[in-house]
Image: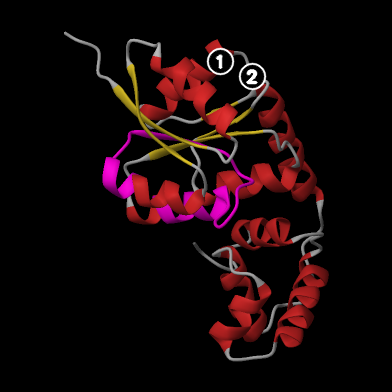
Amino acid sequence: MAQKTIRILVADDHPVVREGLSAMLGREEDFEVVGQAIDGREAVDKVARLKPDVVLMDLKMPRMDGVEAIREIKRSHPGTEVLVLTTFDSDEYIFQGIEAGARGYLLKDAPREELFRAVRVVAQGESLLQPTVAARLVNRFAELSRRPAPEETLSERELEVLRCMARGAANKEIATQLVISESTVKTHVTNIFQKLGASDRTQAVTLALQRQLIAL
């Protein structure tokens, strides 16, 4: 039985990287690069039109970044899998990419055979993290699990702000959605961090999900 061809969309704002990846992937017998995107907005549009099996997604891109694009793609086309390929290995980027719905996360210095394997694994609906990335993720969850449970409870308004944060909304968007000032949103975010014992938005959302304060 013939091997199924994996349709791939490459999203990266650097032309050399985009063209290089497309050429490299296109030489594999079971890969077909069906398109390229220069930013997250174009990636979302081309997923709708080209119906790829896997999107190879950079995170830091203009107009719409990779994290927001992943959320849009998974919301509108849940059958399309996303493999993050980026230079960013910070905990925040790793968490954001995975929470948005990416199946895999590789750094751009990964060997080509590791990239090929990741594409094939992700296309089957399975997850794959580069070992260094997986270690960062495990360490981060271990750190979170050691934190004491907060004594203070979040107000209903703080929970509303937190739900917006979980959807990836910025302070200005939250202010518009909840019809409050941006400075009030900033105050709520600060209070949420203090009450949850979080140092950033990603950690706050992760802790809230773990403690079932909110649901995605």
- Calculate the distance from the C-alpha at mark 1 to the C-alpha at mark 2: 6 Å
Query: Callout 2 environment at 10 Å: few (<14), some (14 to 19), or many (20+)?
Result: few
Q: Is residue 15 left or right of residue 25?
A: right
Relative vertical location of residue 172 with respect to residue 76 in this rendering, above or below:
below
| Residue in front for this viewpoint, 150 or 101 | 101
Residue 156: where, in percent of width, then height? Answer: 62, 84
Question: Residue 207: horizontal and vertical position, in percent?
Answer: 68, 58
Residue 42 falls inside the magenta stretch: no
Residue named by callout 2? 110
The local crowd at label 1, few if under 14, some if 14 to 19, many if 20 or more residues have their Cα within 10 Å, is: few
- On whether residue 58 falls in the magenta region, the answer is yes
- 2 left or right of 116? left
* Residue 198 vertical placement versus 94 (above, below): below
Residue 62 percent across, percent down from the top left: 60, 53
Q: For residue 46, say whether it is visible.
A: yes
* Highlighted magenta segment, given as a residue range: 47-73
In the rendered view, would you say 167 is above or below 47? below
| Of residues 215 and 5, the one drawn nearer to the viewer in this rendering | 5
Q: Which mark is residue 20?
A: none
The amino acid at mark 2 is Ala
Amino acid found under the numbered disc labelled 1:
Glu
Which element type, helix, strand or loop, lies under badge 1? helix
How far from the left and from the top, in percent, is residue 186? Answer: 76, 79
Residue 191, quarter of the rendered image? bottom right
Taking the spot 16% from the left edge, 8% from the top edge, the residue there is 1
- Answer whether labels 1 and 2 touch (C-beta < 8 Å): yes
Give the residue at the far left of this rendering. Answer: 1
Name the image colouring: secondary structure
The residue carrying mark 1 is 114
